[in-house]
Amino acid sequence: MGGINITKKLKIYTLGPPNPCTKCKKTRKNLEATIEKMGKTLGDIEYSHLDIKSKEVVEKYGILQGPAVIANDIVISQGHVPTKKKLEDGLKKVMEMAK
C-alpha cells in the first residue's frame, strides 16, 4: 500500500513598494541568487513580490520597513539589504521549522 506524498511549498516574498527602490532591487537580486544557490534543498517554492503598504500585507504582517523578506509567514529581514548569507541562514531556519 502506497503512502501519500505531501509536498510542503516554501512561500517566499519580498516586500517593498510597487516600483522597487535600489535597496529593494538589491534585496531581490540577493534573494534570487540565494534561491538558485540552495537549489533543490529548498524543494517546491513559490516566490513573489508584494506591495509593503497594501491592506492585505499590513493586516497580515503589521507595519514593516522595506525592503523585507518573508518565508512561510516568518520575517527573515526588514529595513535593510540582507546579505546572501543572512538569507540562506533564514531560509534554513524556516525549513527546519516546517519539518
Image (cartoon, helix red, strand yellow):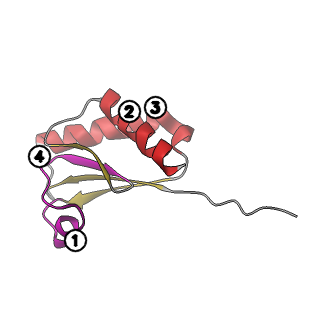
Query: Is there CB contact under 8 Å for labels 1 and 3?
Result: no
Query: Under tag 4, what secondary structure?
Result: loop
If the image is split into quadrants, where does the N terminus sit? bottom right
Give the amino acid at mark 3.
Lys
Q: For the residue carrying disc 4, how many other residues have a C-alpha within 10 Å: few (<14), some (14-19), or many (20+)? A: few
Q: Is residue 29 left or right of residue 10?
A: left
Query: Residues at badges 3 and 4 in contact (C-beta under 8 Å)?
Result: no
Front label number (2 vs 4): 2
Q: Which residue is mark 4?
A: 21
* Picture quadrant where residue 27 is located: top left
Q: Which residue is mark 3?
A: 37
Give yes or no for contact between labels 2 and 4 (Cβ–Cβ under 8 Å): no
Left-right relation of 65 to 13: left
The amino acid marked with disc number 1 is: Glu
Which disc, if any, is residue 56? 1
Is 50 situated above or below 97?
below
**Mark toward the start of the polypeptide (3 vs 4):** 4
Residue 33 visible, this angle: no
For label 2, the crowd category at 10 Å Cα-Cα, with few meaning under 14, some 14 to 19 and many 20 or more, is few
Who's the residue at 78% across and 61% down the image? Answer: 3
Tell me if label 3 and label 2 are in contact, CB under 8 Å: no
Magenta segment: 52-71
| Distance between mark 3 and mark 2 Cα atoms | 12 Å
Query: In the rendering, which numbered label is found on residue 89?
Result: 2
